[in-house]
Image (spheres, grey):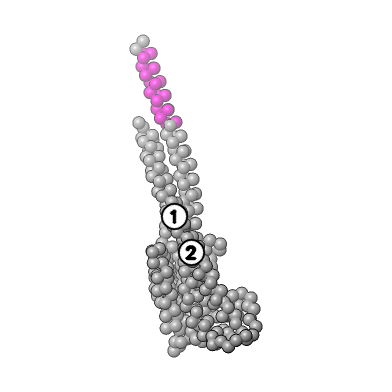
Amino acid sequence: MSTATLLIAKKIKDMRFILKVTEALQLISSAKLKNYRKIAYRSHEYCVGIKFLFKKFYDSYEHDFTVTNKKFLLAEKIHKKLVLLVVIGTDLALCGRFNKQIVDYIKSNFYEKHTLLVVFGKKITSLLANTPFKDKIIKSYNSEFPFANYSTHIEKCTNYLLKEYVNRGCYFLQIVHKSPSKPFKLKKLLPFTEDYFGGVERSIRYETHEYKVHTPDCVVEMFPTFFERTLQLSLVESKIAEHNLRKDVMSNAIKAAEEKLQEYQILYRKMKQAVITQEISEITAAIKVKS
C-alpha cells in the first residue's frame, strides 16, 4: 500500500473518531437540555406565582418605590454609580463563542470603575481576568449545579449576592445572560423604578374590611424571594440557550464530518482501485514478456 493510501486510511480513522465524539457531545447536550427544560417546566407555576404576588404589592397605591429603595441602601456610604453585576456564562467547550460574546457585551456597556462582578462559570471568569474587569470579580461559581439540590445552591447564592449588595454600598443590582430568545438579557433588579414591570397601573384604594398588611414592607420582605426566583430563571434560561447552541454546533459538525468521511472513503476506494489496476497491468505485462 502506498504512502498516500496509508495517509488517507489514517484520515478515515481520525474522522470516524471525530464523528463518534461529536455525536456523543450532541447526545449529552440533548440530555442536559431535556433536564433544564424539565426544571423550567416544574418551577414555572412557582415562578409565575411569585412574580404575580410581588407585582401586586409593587403596583399597590400604598407603595412608593422611592421609599422602599432606601430600605436596601443600608451601608454607611452608598456609591450611586456602583453596579453589582451577576454574569452567567458557560463552562462547556464548543459553544460558538458563548462566553466571548458576553464579555464583549460587558466591556461595551459597563465601566470597570463602577462595576463589581459575581460570575457563574470558570471559563468566563478566566476571560474576564484578561480584561480591565479582572480586579472587579468578587466571587466565581461553577456555571452548573447538581440537579439534586439545585434550589439549595440558588438560595445560598441569593443570600450572598444580597449581602454583598448591601455591605459594599451598591446602588444597582443586575443580571446579564444569554437566552434562547434573545442574544442577551439584562435584568435590572435594583433600584426599583416607575416602570419596573413595564407600564404600571396603580391599584385603586378600596376598603371592604379592616386589614393589617403593610404593603411597602411586603415589597421589601418579598424581594429576596423574587430575586431568588429571577436568578434561578436566568441560570436555567442560560443553560437552555447554551445547550441549544452546542447541540446546533454539534449537529453542523456531525454533518461536516460525515461529508468529509464520505469524501475520504471515495478517494480511498479510487486509490485502492488504481493500485489494483496497476498491479494487474504489471502482471499482464510480465506474462506477455515471458510468452
Image coordinates of residue 179 in percent, x first then y, are 52, 63
Q: Main secondary structure of the magenta part?
A: helix
Q: Residue at x 41, y 67 (%)?
A: 150
Image coordinates of residue 255 in percent, x first then y, are 49, 45
Q: Which mark is residue 42?
A: 2
Range of residues picked out in magenta: 270-289
Residue extending furthest toward the top: 291
Dot 1, crowdedness within 10 Å: few (<14), some or many (≥20)? few
- 169 over 246 or under it: above or below: below
- Circle 1 sits on which residue? 31
Image coordinates of residue 184 in percent, x first then y, are 53, 66
Q: Which numbered mark, 1 or 2, is in the foreground of this view? A: 2
In which quadrant of the rendered view does residue 285 lie? top left
Query: Residue 284 in magenta?
Result: yes
Using the rendered image of the protein, determine whether residue 106 is visible from the camera's viewpoint. no
Instruction: From the viewer's perspective, tell me whether residue 236 is left or right of residue 194.
Output: left
Taking depth in this image into account, of 203 and 103 the one nearest to the observer is 203
How far is disc 1 from disc 2 in space, using C-alphas? 17 Å
Image coordinates of residue 167 in percent, x first then y, are 42, 83
Q: Which mark is residue 107?
A: none
What kind of residue is marked 2? Arg
- 261 over 244 or under it: above or below: above
Q: Residue at x 50, y 79 (%)?
A: 222
